[in-house]
Amino acid sequence: MSTQALVTEAPQTLRQQDWLTLANNLQLETGLFIDGRFVEARKGNRFDSLNPATGEVLASVAFGDESDVDRAVASAKQAWNGGHWRYMAPRSRMAVLMRLADLVEQNAGELALLETLDMGKPITDALTIDLPEVVSSIRFYAECIDKLEGAVTNTAAAALHLIQREPLGIVGAISPWNYPLLMATWKVAPALAAGNCVVLKPAQQAPLSCLRLAQLFIEAGGPPGVFNVVNGDGPVTGRALALHMDVAKISFTGSTAVGKQIMIYAGQSNLKRVALETGGKSPQIFMPDLEDLDAAVERAYGGIFDNAGQVCNAGSRLLVHRDLHDAFVEKFVERSRQAYRPGDPLNPATTLGPVVTRAHQQGVLAKIEQGLREGAQLVMGGGEPSGMEQGAYVSPTLFTGVEPGMSIARDEIFGPVAAVIPFEDEAEAIAIANDSIYGLAASVWTRDLKTAHRMVGALEAGVVWVNCFGDGDMTQPFGGYKQSGNTRDKSFECLLGYTQSKSAWFDLG
Ligand code: NAD
């Protein structure tokens, strides 16, 4: 079978050389996607998307300014007013999204390749984690469409009261680059399922895969104008979308600082709804009675080093009971050294890709320097892996002797940097864990059911994992407490967030 055929039929069998050949022959779509087709930006502006593994320009991509955002919102508004999508029979809308999921599955090899080239994640991760989750996300929300229900409330006989759920109108989605297609899909799929029209602004560091998704939506039978994509940067393109008077909701995933800005834009414009999924500094807590130290250590390093630490819920704070401390650190270093092989992300054996840009790499390295200056002990990593200088790589890094007040224990680094903080007892573990502006996720390792339940109750986090880390499926509401956000992605709860209730009171007297 040819490489071209294999990328559709069995992408997991491709070798590094095959991926390279495919990458060299890729036909990239780089326009804005408005009203069902690719168009140039009005002023012809473009920006370069770089491959962080090589530093080379991957594509020149259309950059949408305010007038392009206007054009995309106008197209979405026309589609909304036309009513075709929102009034489509639920099972028909479901069929379109099911076809979209099938098309994403059939094109998973190509989409995974776009992710790897654009933001550097290992091709095996893109194929086995990102793409299957994108597909299940679209299928989950397609399946939910005819499960949305209203209510008839208990009124006096002379009245009938209906509560119906309706879509909001035009949803603006602003997404990050760490899982470019998946983070966008967590917004676009429920928004479309609920009957809204969407304008998506992907992260400028990884603009390509979302363009393909929009194209596949049309191929799946989605009406033009219902799903538009405008690439560009945050201060111009994202801002224009968040300030737009015709956008009913902004669904944002990204940093806490930009999330705050999005709330200001909503206040400055039309009081649009704002759903935020923002940063994190998640604690992984290891109690002295945990059952299996090997399993705990394996999940501990996976929880911070996978995707080169560029995960919102990354378990960057390792709270380890003093009795376990030395054995834990020794195993962590020994095992994680074997687990993460830096290399060309197109090599299926690579387990550590570069971080997303050279600038981000420098930011992560600066945080490591700061940790050293503050007196933490570096026991592993701390710089760039040797021989990988052409790309933006950072070695998996472990600090011990970390005090809860140090910057490496407080700031989101968004790179492969873990900080071990020892503790004496449960109360101290909870106090350290909750001493953060963030509250996205946490984990607890213990064999005692009572300890587990007490700690689940005491932890200020939207997601708590017990004796695991990062597990879940589409039924799990995913989002943060405190400054980690104000909404939930995934789950039925998320779908409701793309609807509003209407009360209809009938006088039957
Ligand atoms: P970022 O905040 O820099 O950018 C996110 C998006 O916002 C991008 O599309 C960007 O172009 C846009 N943006 C930037 N400035 C803007 C502005 N002034 N107005 C409107 N839009 C603007 O974040 P990032 O670096 O792309 O992503 C990393 C961050 O995302 C981390 O903080 C991470 O924790 C967070 N994240 C959170 C979740 C979650 O579910 N809570 C998931 C993934 C990532």
Image (tube, rainbow, N blue to C red):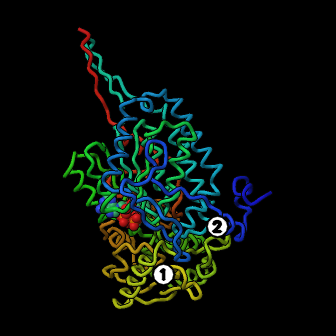
Which of 329/343 is in front? 343
Q: Quadrant of residue 399?
A: bottom left
Q: In the current view of this chain or complex, which residue is farthest to the right? A: 1
Which of 68/14 is in front? 68
Q: Quadrant of residue 196?
A: top left
The nearer-to-camera label among 1 and 2 is 2
Q: Residue at x 22, y 56 (%)?
A: 264
- Amino acid residing under circle 2: Asn
Which of 335/453 is in front? 335
Q: CA distance from mark 1 to mark 2?
A: 53 Å
Q: Which residue is mark 2?
A: 24
SS assignment at label 1: loop
Q: Quadrant of the C terminus?
A: top left
Disc nearer the start of the sequence (1/2): 2
Q: In the current view of this chain or complex, which residue is farthest to the top? A: 509
Instruction: Report the side of 170 relative to 301 (left or right).
Output: left
Q: Say few, some or many: other residues with alpha carbon within 10 Å of mark 2 (under 14 / 14 to 19 / 20 or more).
A: few
Q: Residue at x 51, y 33 (%)?
A: 93
Q: Is mark 2 within 8 Å of ligand 1?
A: no
Which of 64/191 is in front? 64
Q: Residue at x 53, y 41 (%)?
A: 218
Figure quarter occupied by ligand 1: bottom left
Coordinates of residue 14 in the picture (x, y in percent): 72, 64
Instruction: Report the side of 441 relative to 447 (left or right).
Output: left
SS assignment at label 2: helix
- Amino acid residing under circle 1: Asp
Q: Say few, some or many: other residues with alpha carbon within 10 Å of mark 1 (under 14 / 14 to 19 / 20 or more).
A: some
Label 2 near label 1: C-beta < 8 Å?
A: no
Q: Which residue is mark 1?
A: 323
Q: In the current view of this chain or complex, which residue is farthest to the left? A: 268
